Image (tube, rainbow, N blue to C red):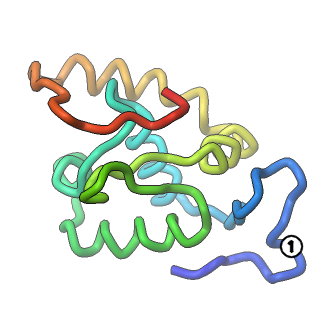
Amino acid sequence: MKNRFPESESRDTNFPPGCIPACVNSEDIRLLQQLLANRHGSLTLTELSARNREDEATLAEHLDGLRENGLVTTLGDSGKYYTVTECGIQVLKQIGHYEQIGILHDMYSAAETDVGAGDRPRPEWL
């Protein structure tokens, strides 16, 4: 997935350097919200796959596109944990989809089993 904005529209001064506020679709929004709506602030492909009807390969490809546009990044030495960047958070706020994360968080928290975070890295914003 490449930047879906024409080059002349790809920069907005309200976004951090290196952030491309891509024209996000409903799938992008869903994934960004899911990454934010958990107590760890990050998820693996396996965890995302369990929340969606997509296999890990398809999700990885989609997340690579979001990463290219500066909306998500990976954490840890293995890079297996995905999290939303400050740019991704700002995009969700700008389009009015950030506030819904609290509802998703409550829903996921109620359904989670008590699995320790272990050595899961935390995003800087958490």
Taking the spot 70% from the left edge, 60% from the top edge, the residue there is 19
Local packing at callout 1 (Cα closer than 10 Å; few below 14, some 14-19, many 20+) is: few
Percent x, y of residue 109: 26, 20
Amino acid residing under circle 1: Glu
Residue underneath mark 1: 9
Taking the spot 24% from the left edge, 37% from the top edge, the residue there is 120
Taking the spot 10% from the left edge, 25% from the top edge, the residue there is 115
> In this rendering, does residue 52 appear at all?
no
Q: Quadrant of residue 95?
A: top right
Looking at the image, which is closer to me, 49 or 118? Answer: 118
Percent x, y of residue 4: 67, 77
Q: How many marks?
A: 1
Relative side of 53 to 68, left or right: left
Q: Is residue 88 above or below residue 56?
A: above
Relative side of 74 to 10, left or right: left
Percent x, y of residue 86: 63, 43
Q: Is residue 30 above or below residue 11?
A: above
Taking the spot 75% from the left edge, 76% from the top edge, the residue there is 5
> In this rendering, does residue 113 appear at all?
yes
Residue situated furthest front in the rendering: 77
Percent x, y of residue 14: 85, 48
Name the secondary structure under disc 1.
helix
